[in-house]
Image (cartoon, helix red, strand yellow):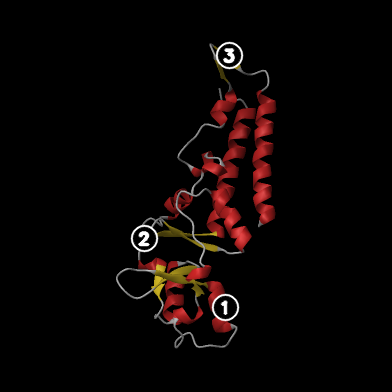
Amino acid sequence: MQGMVRGVLSIQEILRSAILKNCQGRCIVEGKGIYSRIGCVTSSSSSIAEKGLENITVADILMTKGDYKVGSWLWCLTDDNVDDAARNMAKNNIGSLVVLKPGEQQQIAGIFTERDYLRKIVGEGRSSTYTRVGEIMTDENKLITLPSDANIVQAMQLMTENQIRHVPVIDGKIVGMISIVDVVRAVVGQQSGELKRLNGFIKGEYY
């Protein structure tokens, strides 16, 4: 993943350089300001495809997933059995659940992931019906989270450095969950948008 982070950032630099080269001689000076076609290519938008990676936040990714509709499908309890938790993940097509301690305060106890299931249930030959989530989850002291205002580059770096695929998003409380798949999709969407705008610029579609 470290190579992916470096590769994504280098692609952005290549695209910017290409735009600048094609822009030479096409700028119009008006008063103190310089207006060029590149301004249209790099203009901001609410769409992920039109934002630079540093401007795409975790909140943007959650919005595209619909994860701001937080519900019980995002978590389970420490005393739930693994079988029920795994069914919940399969039903909602997600790869992890935040694990909460029993009680009204909803204190975070850890995270339960597909990797936990494979290593500690399948790998150790344990019964998912009679094993509690709290027995095999990744503990809270090892839990890594992100705030919703973190950008996608920070998310990629966090996942790379810690070799994890799922990160709960916490703003004082659980607001969602992002995975490496979500991050890659956002990167691909942004780069596709960048290439499309560059192609339109070269063809003279921007003024």
Quadrant location, the N terminus: bottom right
Circle 1: element type: helix
Mark-to-mark CA distance, 1 and 2: 26 Å
Q: Tags 1 and 2 in contact by the CB under 8 Å rule?
A: no
Q: Nearer the viewer, residue 179 or 162?
A: 162
Q: Quadrant of residue 12?
A: top right
Task: Specify the label residue 70 is tagged with.
Answer: 2
The answer to whether residue 162 is seen in the rendering is yes
- Identified at 36% across, 68% down, the residue is 72
Q: Provide residue 128's location: percent of width, then percent of height.
A: 48, 84
Mark-to-mark CA distance, 3 and 2: 50 Å
For the residue carrying disc 3, how many other residues have a C-alpha within 10 Å: few (<14), some (14-19), or many (20+)? few
- Identified at 44% across, 88% down, the residue is 130
Mark 3: which amino acid? Val
Circle 2: element type: loop
Residue reaching furthest to the left: 104
Earlier in the chain: of badge 3 and badge 1, it is 3
Q: Quadrant of residue 160?
A: bottom right
Q: Nearer the viewer, residue 9 or 189?
A: 9
Mark 2: which amino acid? Val
Task: Specify the label residue 29 is tagged with.
Answer: 3
Depicted 202 relative to depicted 142: above or below: above
Quadrant location, the C terminus: top right
Q: Provide residue 35's location: percent of width, then percent of height.
A: 56, 19
To which residue does mark 1 refer? 118
- Identified at 41% across, 66% down, the residue is 74
The answer to whether residue 205 is seen in the rendering is no
For the residue carrying disc 1, how many other residues have a C-alpha within 10 Å: few (<14), some (14-19), or many (20+)? few
Circle 3: element type: strand
